[in-house]
Image (spheres, helix red, strand yellow):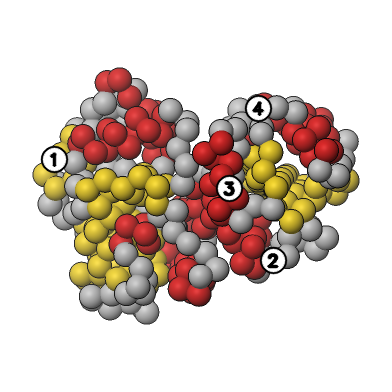
């Protein structure tokens, strides 16, 4: 089969992803084999491209957000049959979905209704799962006492779907940050009750709106640099959920408030050997919300053809750090 792959980590200006012929995936017992119809392209994948190289003689196939059709099932895969339309994520330790087919654990896949296009479905899994786990953890809702949630980076894939999840499942007052008029308008479309500019003084802007503290911050970008004002804004015993922590952190602003710090990595269960079945169930719930009109897909850029030029275009847009919603490529 054909796949987009590369051998050595590389920067965007030396883009080395190529269309190559590779063996078809081998199914594990709990896998389904999916014929890819659409993929979403994420900032994390662009980052991995820049730092991860293949083993000598090997190649890297990225991509862990897709929609397609089941064409084969493993011996212990349940709940899915050949011909099912599905969406899902994957496992970053295995080949991804930038290919004609992907083998994926059936527990991180969900059926999609006929009313939902493949492109629309592909825009949902990563952002929805990340937002759910970051805010709700392994529960069904927010921690007790959380009534105001601030989302840093509300126009991105995670922020867009986290906002919609909060409005669909909770009564929380949702504040989003965005720096440009277009991204601020998008946050309001997603359901944010208030939008502030993270390039300016966030505490001052919230103070002008009569808000001096929030109960939870979901930070999708720039967390390490923003800890000072985040800590000052959170109430004592508040919650910070972050999806981008990597650098050494000064936790002083958080410890002064006895803040609970939560990290989120959407592949932690499947890569860590835990049962990821909850993710499949969450994706089923997301489909129900979309059908009922409580949530909507977040495709803002749609390209046709899983080609090198289209993938380079997607990475170029992502590395400008100005994308709104989700970039999707239909095959």
Q: Residue at x 23, y 76 (%)?
A: 82
Label 2 or label 3, whichever comes before in sequence order? 2
**Would you name the residue on which mark 3 appears?**
187
Q: Quadrant of residue 198?
A: top right
- Mark 2 Cα shell of 10 Å, populated few (<14), some (14-19), many (≥20): few
Looking at the picture, tell me which residue is in the foreground, 157 or 26.
157
Which of discs 1 and 4 lies nearer the camera? The answer is: 4
Q: Position of residue 141 (x, y in %)?
A: 68, 66
Is there CB contact under 8 Å for labels 2 and 3? no
Which tag, 1 or 4, sits closer to the chain's start? 1
Q: Residue at 27% of width from left, 33% of height from top?
A: 312
Where residue 117 sits in the image (x, y, percent)?
Answer: 32, 64
Tags 3 and 4 touching, CB below 8 Å: no
Task: Work out whether mark 1 precedes mark 3 in sequence or the reverse, and give the earlier one.
Answer: 1
Q: Which residue is mark 2?
A: 170
Crowdedness near tag 1: few (<14), some (14–19) or many (≥20) residues, C-alpha within 10 Å = few
Asked if marks 2 and 4 touch (Cβ < 8 Å), the reply is no
Viewed as shown, does residue 77 lie left or right of 225? left
Whole-Å distance between the Cαs marked 2 and 4? 28 Å
* Residue located beneath label 4 in the image: 199
Choose mark 2 or mark 3, whichever is in front: 3
Contact between labelled residues 3 and 1, with CB atoms less than 8 Å apart: no
Q: Nearer the viewer, residue 139 or 141?
A: 141
Residue that badge 1 annotates: 20
Alpha carbon distance from label 1 to label 4 = 43 Å
Of 131 and 103, nearer the camera is 131
Closest to the camera, between mark 2 and mark 4, is: 4
Residue 292 pos. (x, y %): 50, 75
Residue 149 position (above or below residue 180): below
Alpha carbon distance from label 3 to label 4: 16 Å
Say which element carries label 2.
loop
């Amino acid at each position: 089969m054909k796949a987009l792959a590369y051998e050595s980590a590389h920067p965007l200006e030396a883009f080395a992803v190529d269309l190559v012929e590779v063996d078809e995936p081998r199914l594990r017992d709990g896998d389904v084999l999916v014929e890819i119809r659409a993929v979403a392209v994420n900032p994390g994948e662009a980052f991995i491209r820049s730092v991860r190289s293949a083993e000598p003689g090997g190649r890297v196939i990225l991509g862990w957000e897709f929609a397609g059709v089941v064409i084969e099932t493993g011996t212990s895969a349940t709940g899915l049959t050949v011909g099912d339309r599905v969406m899902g994520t994957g496992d970053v330790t295995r080949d991804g979905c930038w290919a004609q087919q992907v083998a994926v654990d059936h527990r991180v896949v969900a059926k999609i209704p006929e009313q939902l296009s493949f492109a629309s479905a592909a825009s949902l899994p990563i952002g929805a799962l990340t937002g759910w786990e970051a805010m709700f953890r392994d529960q069904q809702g927010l921690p007790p006492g959380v009534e105001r949630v601030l989302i840093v980076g509300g126009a991105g894939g995670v922020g867009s779907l986290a906002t919609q999840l909060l409005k669909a499942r909770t009564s929380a007052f949702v504040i989003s940050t965005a720096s440009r008029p277009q991204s601020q308008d998008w946050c309001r479309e997603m359901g944010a009750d208030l939008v502030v500019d993270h390039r300016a003084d966030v505490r001052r802007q919230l103070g002008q709106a009569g808000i001096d503290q929030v109960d939870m911050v979901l930070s999708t970008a720039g967390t390490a640099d923003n800890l000072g004002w985040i800590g000052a804004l959170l109430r004592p015993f508040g919650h910070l959920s972050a999806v981008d922590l990597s650098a050494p952190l000064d936790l002083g602003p958080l410890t002064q408030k006895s803040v609970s710090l939560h990290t989120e990595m959407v592949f932690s269960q499947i890569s860590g050997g835990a049962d990821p079945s909850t993710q499949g169930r969450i994706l089923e719930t997301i489909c129900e919300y979309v059908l009922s009109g409580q949530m909507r897909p977040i495709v803002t850029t749609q390209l046709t053809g899983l080609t090198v030029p289209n993938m380079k275009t997607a990475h170029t847009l992502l590395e400008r750090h100005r994308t709104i919603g989700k970039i999707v490529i239909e095959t």
